[in-house]
Image: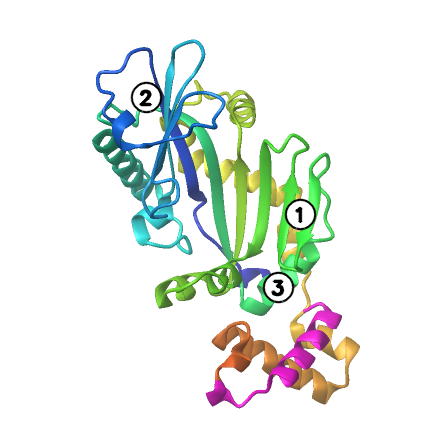
Amino acid sequence: MDDHRAKTSDSMLDTVGIKHFYKALSCDDFKRKWKYLSNARHPTWIHNAKGSETMPNLTMILTPNGIYHLSAQVSLPKLLFGHNARLPNQQEVNQGLQIMAEYTEGTSGLPFDVQTATTSLIHFANDIQLTEPGVWQMVEKLSKRQMKPLRKNFYEDSTLYFTSRAKTRQIRIYPKLQAVLDEKNATKQAIEEANGNLRFEYCLLKKSAIDSLVSRYGLPDNKAQNLLTENVSNRLTSELLERLNFFDLLSNNKTSLVILREHFPTKKAMNLCGFLQMEKEYGRNFYKDESLGISKDSYYRCLRDCRKAKV
């Protein structure tokens, strides 16, 4: 897997949360239409909390100082494309934010301006296109990295998490195709978009993490128009890849065949390369396609050998 085969997408966004504050309400019809949470710490109303993933989830909270907080949260790719295997560019992000604002205004009856909205949550995202075997090989290499003081967790040999102690920010690295295939009713388009992509997500989960980024980058404030930009996303992702020494790992990679021959006889190494190619073209668990004539036992035997060789 040579470094010239890796293609980096423009860094952008997945899930975002934006909010507005109101000292007085010009309309309170939402109180009759939205679900009221009787067990919440403060008076809270929610809409679409467990509904369609493609439309924003809305929350209104009345704080003790008499200020209403109205927040909208959604996966912008799912809002725009129906899935998040493809990341939006800046123009599409702006379109998605406008859809969020219009939906929130129409549902709440309150003004909700994108330009002046405060950012309450951000999942910056970036895809690096390798090959499916290359993706898994890179995940294995990155799993040996540390990013202190963040805590590392390697989940099911596929998803790498680096999380702050206060859980205000989290970095996620995982094979995007596997994530898509794990979802119910994965579309052909989503599978095609995800194939061979290693997904990086840098998630700012709390106000303190967002404020810290604003201060570090010298931004005017935490408004959506200053934070939800391609420039900020690219800058943050570049810093992450540099900290992980990602491109050094990529340029020093051996081919899968070379690695397999270090562990097995040439003939077996060749057969396992064929197995990796099958996974690339037919996806994980391809033994389930009976037309291929591959048994489950044979599939997992090859999988164990490939994992043993760390390809």
Is residue 196 rendered to the left or right of residue 70? right
The one nearer the camera, 18 or 25, is 25
Q: Position of residue 47 (x, y in %)?
A: 33, 36
Quarter residue 149 falls in: top right
| Residue 118, above or below 287 | above
Circle 2: element type: loop
Instruction: Give the labeled residue for mark 1.
Output: 245
Distance from Cα at disc 3 to Cα at disc 1? 17 Å
| Residue 284, above or below 41 | below
Instruction: Give the labeled residue for mark 2.
Output: 116
Which residue corresponds to the image point at 58% horizontal and 47% vertical from the top-left?
A: 172
Labels 1 and 2: the sequence-earlier one:
2
Q: Please, which colouring scheme is shown?
A: rainbow
Question: In this rendering, which labeled residue sits more in front, label 1 or label 2?
Answer: 2
Labels 3 and 2: the sequence-earlier one:
2
Residue 240 part of the magenta segment: no
Q: Position of residue 213 (x, y in %)?
A: 54, 26
> Quadrant of the image for the C terminus?
bottom right
Circle 1: element type: loop
